[in-house]
Image (tube, rainbow, N blue to C red):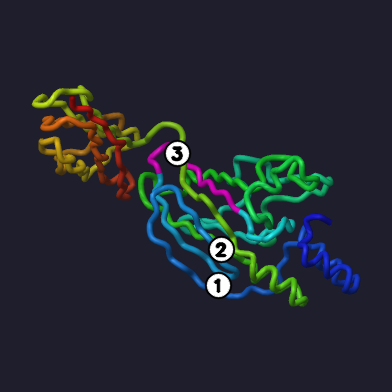
Amino acid sequence: MRRVMFTCLLALMLVSAVFIAGCASDRRIDNPTTTISTTQTVLPSAASNKAVNVPYGEEIKLSLDSPATSEVYLTMTARADSKELGGGRSFMRIRMNGKEIASERLVNKKLNFTYGDGFNSTYYSKNMSAWYLFFSPDFVGYDDPKLLDHILEGNAYIYKFDVSDIVNKGAPNEIVLENIGDEVAAQYTDPKTIEYYKSATIIVNPIKLEGKGANVVQITKEAAPTRIIVGKTSTVTLTIKNDLPGSISDVEISDSALPSGLSGQPVSGKLQTPVPTGGSYSITYEVRADKEGTYVLGPATTTFADPTGNYQKLSSGTVTLTVI
């Protein structure tokens, strides 16, 4: 009974067999009897990597920018905050752009898992429409093979979901994380058990959108040469490549301002024609070295309308110039 909450373990010695059966359900039963309305907190837009805390009975809404790749995955490292290892329960719901993240999207491990003592459970509860989290003070306890109660298959805390079909590629995406500890606590009458769930904040660190596969639209920034002497120039090239199954239109390009010590005119403007599928567009400009040093040229950005009419925004990498 190592996964049963430590407070419950103490209660087991004090209360009736009826409550014993209820307390054991922390491992197995995900069938809420009451739904309590939640409050919502809206977080500012994030780039691609964020830490989030979701208090009891609340939901957090955040925005994550997606890479414009053929495959996109929502990944997170998550646990239920607890001073000691205390088992697990299904009480984290996830939605992305209004779509539920359910069992079929999990790709980094099997849905079923086994504790070290042989007890079997599942990472996703259909009854609760929620994901299983471990009560833990950190992100290592149940992955420690020295612990008798560790998880035998996969990483206990890391979740990776395939969201390629519901993501806004190259654009912001709304992610909603909901702590349904209130629904779980409503199954109990013991005040200690209820208080335990009230203190179980969901800790997610980090949460991000990761890309894989071919870039469906890509903007790159290059410079040649990258090592020059004072008074000489380097040519900066910006290229947009479109591998979407259709043209991109209303394409605008904007490059970062040059750092002090370099002079030139970064490009900015709108393309007169769409970029067809399989096509690319490049533009160049000169950068003059005025002073010795190492300079980082910031990313270029592009906005465009994809074949479905949705607008997307992408950024290139940076370029380093060395002036001697």
Asked if residue 286 can be seen in this view, the reply is no
Pointer 2 residue: 178
Question: Residue 112's spot in the image, x, y percent?
Answer: 73, 45
Q: Dot 2: what SS?
A: strand
Q: Hey, which quadrant is residue 108 in on the image?
A: top right
Q: Check disc 2: other Cα within 10 Å, few if <14, some if 14-19, many if 20+.
A: many
Residue at 34% over, 33% down: 243
Q: Nearer the viewer, residue 247 or 226?
A: 226
Residue located at (45% from left, 32% from top) = 213
Q: Which residue is mark 1?
A: 38
If you read the primary sequence from the N terminus, does the residue marked by circle 1 or circle 2 appear first?
A: 1
Magenta stretch, main secondary structure, is strand
In which image quadrant can residue 255 be found? Answer: top left
Highlighted magenta segment, given as a residue range? 67-78
Residue 288, position in %: x, y? 11, 30
As measured in the structure, the alpha-carbon distance from the residue carrying label 3 to the one carrying label 1 is: 32 Å
User: Dot 1, crowdedness within 10 Å: few (<14), some or many (≥20)?
Assistant: few
Using the numbered discs, state the Cα–Cα distance from disc 3 to disc 2 in whole angstroms: 24 Å
Question: Is residue 263 left or right of 119 when viewed as pictured?
Answer: left
Q: Quadrant of the N terminus?
A: bottom right
Q: Which residue is mark 3?
A: 211
Q: Is 202 placed left or right of 44 in the picture?
A: right
Task: Identify whether 212 is placed above or below 19.
Answer: above
Q: Does residue 68 belong to the magenta stretch? A: yes
Residue that appears at 74% across and 58% down: 86
The answer to which of marks 3 and 1 sits earlier in the sequence is: 1
With respect to residue 82, does 273 lie above or below?
above
- Judge from the rendering whether residue 294 lies leftward or rightward of residue 182; answer left or right: left
Q: Which three-letter amino acid code belongs to the residue tagged 3?
A: Gly
